[in-house]
Image (cartoon, grey):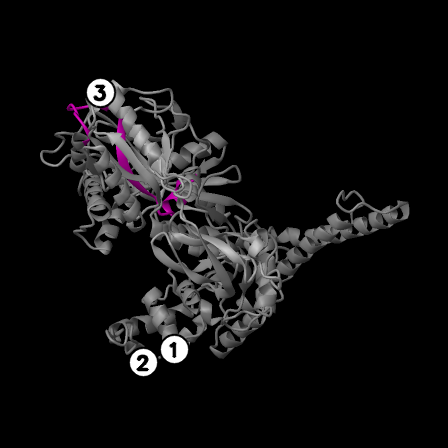
Amino acid sequence: MADPEQRIRELRAELEHHNRLYYTEAAPEISDAEYDAKFRELEELEEDHPELADPNSPTRRVGGEPIEGFEQVRHLVPMLSIDDVFELDPATSDTPEAELIEFYQRLRKNLGRDDIAVTVEPKIDGVAVSLVYRGGVLDYAATRGDGETGDDITHNVRTIHRVPLRLEAAGEAGAGVPELLEVRGEIFMPNEAFARMNEERDEAGLATFVNPRNATAGTLKQLDPKMAAERPLDFLAHGFGAYEGDALGGEDDFTALLESLAIPRNQPLIAAATLEETLEAVGRIDRERHELPYATDGAVIKVADYEERRTLGFRSRAPRWAAAYKFRPEQKETVLRDITVQVGRTGVLTPVAELEPVFVSGTTVSRATLHNEEEIERKDIRIGDTVLVEKAGEIIPAVVKVITDKRPDDAEPFSLPDHVGHRCPSCGGPIAKEEGFVAWRCGNFACPAQAVSRIRQFASRKALDIDGVGGIVAEALVRHAHCRTPLDLFDLDEEPLAALNLGSEEEPRRFGEKNAAKVISALGRARDKPLDRWLFAMGIRHVGESASKELARLHETLRDLPESRVLHGIRDATRLEAERRQVSPRNRDNPPADDDSKKARQEKHDELKREIAAIEDSLAPFEVSPDVGPAVADSVTAFFDSEAGRHVLERLAELGLDPKSANFLPQPAEADPGEAPLAGKTLVLTGTLSVGRDEMKRLLESKGAKVSGSVSKNTDFLLAGEGGGSKRKKAESLGVRVIDEDEARRMIEG
């Protein structure tokens, strides 16, 4: 058997090599499947051998355990900002570049000659970061902070694939890698990825980010690196701080060093030898910036020769040898002709401004998202208004404000539900806005606008695991009218499915007999999937994996949910609690009018309190976990009360399906205690066990336990196999009891 330590080293080196080829050089050598196989092998080896843990392992790209808080890091060399010079308004200045020319004139004066060699590059609108490598290995990453100290954000930066965790110079291994290198650059979100992320947040009814920089800054402030791993962060280098290596004479040498170490750098980097060439380079970046993959609001000009930089020196907060020339944001007036409403793949209704076409920042803009009704109300946007439009972050068209003195007399405030007649524009079903959310949503399970996303959810691995039905197949099934809802999958026949065209009419691509047979077989297996998988598959609002398992613990079959005593009890208690708070004579927002009113309200308050207590007493034996709280109870009962929910039950009956729970525990008063020896206990698994994690998890859940992924103060036991370093340490620090597999089985057997 291969030495685990040697194999781990080999896999880490291979994965870093392939990461660099894929993310930095765009020249992959292996398939995604081959990469995934190596990644899984490394994950398993690291899990089995926690003593060989390495914070710079490629497996940390997906995020590790959340941190408690940010530690402060003192920069090896002060991390200063760059002074801004601004493009002036052409309407008020004959020379918009006047401030840039003044900066160049100061360089001339201080260096004593007319022509100064500089470099000009785009100013990335991101978050400044310092990456410190010692011996070619990433030691830590920090924000600029106050220039002297910054936040240690290493846990989040490790998730960015284009940030090398180890440096390897081209040529002889190890040669040319500086002993100490502090790379400075920007972390940002690429334009297209940012736009996709905002669209997904819009469709999910979440607040959208104003621009890529805000999104990036917010992500880097997360204490949980898994959050950073899920967001499209990228990195480009543009300078350095502390350095111990071969001498660097100027920007050309530094650029060559970055290239040799495969550290991604900012481009284009334009060399200019005179003032005229500098102005020309800045103009070129202004013209081409809309084609760059990231947001930019200016150009950075730096003296190219490092000896001359030392001569020019620094002021207290910025170097004298650099300046950031800020372009004016382009804004145009146009008329908002109409507001249309789109239905997203998750049922969220998004208002869109239909504009008189106008040329802004390099493209013609005729539409702009208005995000939600709250945004429209805040800006008081009305149909017929003259509005000021720009591209948010130079990417997404946005309505900045209304020119109120040009408003038509007949313009009326906009109401989204009134505009669509309180019906979904796609299916005609009712729409609703949940408490605490800003978005209106269609909850119809059969809404055609949501068909593709619902089928993908339904078929996903954690749901019914219908192998072969991914996004492309789901889209083709809906496009060719084979499926309107996920349950229509069970009506598919093998022959027409094999003939399904996944391509276009011009370039058809047949699904094929082999794939069709695989899908039909998977659909047969899906019929026997347990209740929790079916609940997760349905995509009911607020019902994720944990809530699905808890619902299945509380209900024997799917048909028990519509009349669920537990869910209706939770919902009723929540409603009564809201009423109790409102009627309370101590409600400061709604005080009683007089003593008689105060007395009557106190009596009503006490009556409601007794009703709530009675409901809570009736629910207590079920020991409902927080995974099924008021939001889940309300969402599930509302779903089955709706036309869409009733349609689901009818279709399931037609198909002869009534999914059954695999972890149902009878009502505690009637249950045999021996059937649920771990009821109410929360366990966490770590290390290598005698059986697979999933098998052990299923066994524990079948005995009433809840199995969590991370240790907390609410954990009852940590079931530890061989290894399990970090979770074991956390359990010990929190006083959580650590048990082995033999003890766990004794507890199960009673």
Q: Secondary structure at mark 3?
A: loop
Q: Is residue 53 visible?
A: no
Residue 68 seen from this side? yes
Q: Amino acid at mark 1?
A: His
Q: Nearer the viewer, residue 304 or 561?
A: 304
Magenta stretch? 224-251
Instruction: Give amino acid for label 3.
Output: Gly
Q: Which residue is mark 2?
A: 496
Query: Residue furthest toward the left?
Result: 172
Three-letter code, disc 2 = Pro
Q: Is residue 509 magenta?
A: no
The residue shown at (57%, 60%) is 382
Where 61 sits versus 340, above or below? above
Q: CA distance from mark 2 to mark 3?
A: 80 Å
Q: Residue furthest front?
A: 94
Name the quadrant containing residue 452: bottom left
Mark 1 lies on residue: 482
- Label 3 sits on residue: 112
> What's the distance in space between the residues labelled 1 and 2, CA to CA?
9 Å
Q: Earlier in the sequence, mark 1 or mark 3?
A: 3
Q: Is label 1 in contact with label 2 (beta carbons under 8 Å)?
A: yes
Spatial separation of the CA atoms under disc 1 and disc 3:
77 Å
| Element on which disc 2 rests | helix
- Badge 1 crowding class, 10 Å Cα cut-off, few under 14, some 14 to 19, many 20 or more, is some
Q: Secondary structure at mark 1?
A: loop
Q: Position of residue 175 (x, y in %)?
A: 12, 30
Instruction: Rate crowding at label 3 as few (under 14), some (14 to 19) or many (20 or more) other CA atoms within 10 Å.
Output: few
User: In the drawing, does residue 29 fall left or right of residue 76?
Assistant: left
Give the percent coordinates (x, y) of residue 460. 38, 62
